[in-house]
Image: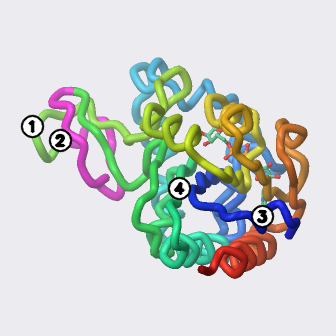
């Protein structure tokens, strides 16, 4: 841990990506064996494909939702939640992930900027609700009763991520920005570090390997999230105990 964290840190923004859930058994996107290996994401995760081949898209997310039931939070999720619950300052957790492992590890405020596997939306009545474990085009919406327009509450490529106004307010006011387990290739999330830097935050990256934006961080810890994340946050907690 470098001394620059000696100074009082009061407001922290944390961004997580698929790498934080990898050791829970959930595939990342761009590593070997990743979800996008052998696929063009634009052939799955767009509104156009949802309209033209709804059952294929629903099936892709049904299987990811089902896989999630067999996964547990790992020490990274637990370390983040412990930090959130014990740090005296303000912590804002943003995740690109659509899994619920942060919540199941005890994190209460989590902003899922790319949506969540655990919820679904009806494009007839616009109702957002808990996702039915497995649903198809023919599944009737529990709210309006119509079939054919249920979709996972996932932000597809080309759609606007959730909570951006709140995210930028939090990043602008952060003393410390910590990015964990993301390749830094998908915007706007990949641009958060530049925004944090421009607004005076110390920027720390924890990732298995260099990301596309490693050069923008004040310090980058290379290693497995389940090793580096607990180490980082326990040390930060110690240094900022009043
Ligand atoms: N510990 C730390 N980092 C890891 C680990 C691990 N155990 N395993 C993988 N990583 C790192 C990889 O090195 C990679 O840099 O996590 C990163 C995962 O990158 P991606 O697979 O691209 O996932 P992510 O950055 O979250 O993708 C962003 O892209 O397709 C969209 O919506 C999707 O939210 C996703 C977004």
Q: Secondary structure at mark 4?
A: strand
The dominant secondary structure in magenta is loop
Residue assigned mark 3: 5
Q: Disc 4 or 2, which lies upstream in sequence? A: 4
Magenta region includes residue 23:
no
Q: Disc 1 or 3, which lies upstream in sequence? A: 3
Disc 1 under 8 Å from ligand 1? The reply is no
Neighbourhood count class around disc 2 (C-alpha, 10 Å): few under 14, some 14–19, many 20 upward: many
Residue assigned mark 4: 93
| Relative height, residue 10 to residue 115 (above, below) | below
Q: Secondary structure at mark 2?
A: loop
Q: Which residue occupies the foreground of this view, 212 or 238? A: 238
Magenta region includes residue 131:
yes
Q: CA distance from mark 4 to mark 1?
A: 33 Å
In screen coordinates, is 107 left or right of 128? right
Nearer mark to the viewer, of 4 and 2: 4
Q: CA distance from mark 3 to mark 2?
A: 50 Å
Neighbourhood count class around disc 1 (C-alpha, 10 Å): few under 14, some 14–19, many 20 upward: few
Q: CA distance from mark 1 to mark 3?
A: 52 Å
Residue assigned mark 2: 141
Q: In which quadrant of the rendered image does the C terminus lie?
A: bottom right
| Relative height, residue 175 to residue 55 (above, below) | below
In screen coordinates, is 19 left or right of 133? right
- Residue 78: quadrant of the picture: bottom right
- Residue 77: quadrant of the picture: bottom right
Say if mark 2 contacts mark 1, CB within 8 Å: yes
Nearer mark to the viewer, of 3 and 2: 3
Q: Which span of residues is magenta-colored?
A: 124-140
In the picture, the disc for residue 144 is: 1
């Amino acid at each position: 841990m470098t001394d620059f964290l000696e100074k009082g840190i009061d407001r922290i923004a944390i961004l997580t990506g698929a790498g934080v859930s990898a050791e829970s058994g959930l595939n990342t996107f761009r590593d070997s064996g990743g979800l996008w290996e052998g696929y063009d994401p634009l052939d799955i995760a767009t509104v156009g494909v949802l309209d033209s081949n709804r059952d294929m898209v629903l099936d892709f997310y049904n299987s990811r939702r089902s896989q999630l039931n067999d996964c547990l939070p790992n020490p990274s999720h637990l370390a983040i939640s412990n930090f959130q619950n014990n740090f005296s300052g303000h912590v804002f957790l943003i995740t690109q992930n659509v899994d619920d492992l942060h919540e199941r590890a005890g994190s209460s405020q989590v902003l899922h900027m790319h949506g969540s596997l655990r919820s679904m939306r009806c494009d007839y009545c616009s109702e957002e609700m808990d996702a039915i474990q497995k649903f198809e085009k023919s599944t009737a919406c529990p709210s309006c009763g119509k079939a054919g327009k249920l979709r996972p509450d996932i932000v597809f490529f080309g759609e606007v991520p959730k909570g951006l106004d709140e995210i930028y307010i939090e990043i602008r006011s952060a003393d410390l920005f910590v990015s964990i387990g993301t390749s830094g290739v998908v915007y706007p999330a990949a641009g958060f570090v530049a925004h944090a830097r421009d607004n005076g935050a110390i920027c720390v990256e924890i990732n298995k390997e260099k990301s596309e934006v490693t050069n923008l961080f004040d310090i980058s810890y290379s290693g497995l999230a389940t090793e580096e994340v607990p180490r980082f946050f326990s040390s930060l907690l110690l240094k900022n105990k009043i």
